[in-house]
Image: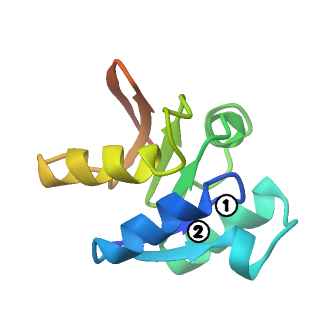
Amino acid sequence: MTFLANENMPIPSVKKLREAGYEVISISEDLPGISDEEVMDKAVEESLIILTFDSDYGELIYKYQKTPPPAVVYFRNKGNSPTWAAYTLIFRLENGLELDGYFTVIKEEGIRQREL
């Protein structure tokens, strides 16, 4: 599983995911300034799971019927530190969270998933 961290994903979370053994491509590091559509296209072409704090990906998929990537993880809350997203995702993955085929919304209160 390879993640594509949207430009709004804090670099400390990107680094923490990498330290935990996950492969993460970072838009901030590699392709700053590209559009959400270009992020989606890259994710689809390379079978990457998008990590984002941007709800626009749901709109692109469900309203505008763009071809979805294998999965999207939308963090609805920023948490209390720049590593919150990474720690939350790692914990959920270690406890059996399946991402493939889902638009996953992660909030401090819990998780909601919708099929892509």
> Does 102 sit above or below residue 22?
above
| Residue beneath the point at 62% across and 72% down | 26
Inspect the image, locate mark 2, and give the three-letter code of the amino acid beneath it. Ala
> Does 3 sit above or below residue 104?
below
SS category of the residue bearing label 1:
helix
Task: Say if residue 5 shows up in the picture.
Answer: yes
> Does 28 sit above or below residue 87?
below
Q: Where does label 2 land, which residue?
A: 43
Give the percent coordinates (x, y) of residue 4: 55, 67
Viewer-closest of 16 and 93: 16
| Residue beneath the point at 38% across and 66% down | 17
Distance between the Cα atoms at labels 2 and 1? 5 Å
Crowd around label 2: few <14 · some 14–19 · many ≥20 (10 Å): many
| Residue beneath the point at 44% across and 32% down | 105
Inspect the image, locate mark 1, and give the three-letter code of the amino acid beneath it. Met
Q: Where does label 1 land, which residue?
A: 40
SS category of the residue bearing label 2:
helix
> Does 108 sit above or below residue 116?
above
As drawn, which residue projects farthest toward the left?
A: 95
Viewer-closest of 27 and 59: 27
Residues tagged 2 and 1 counted as in contact (Cβ below 8 A): yes
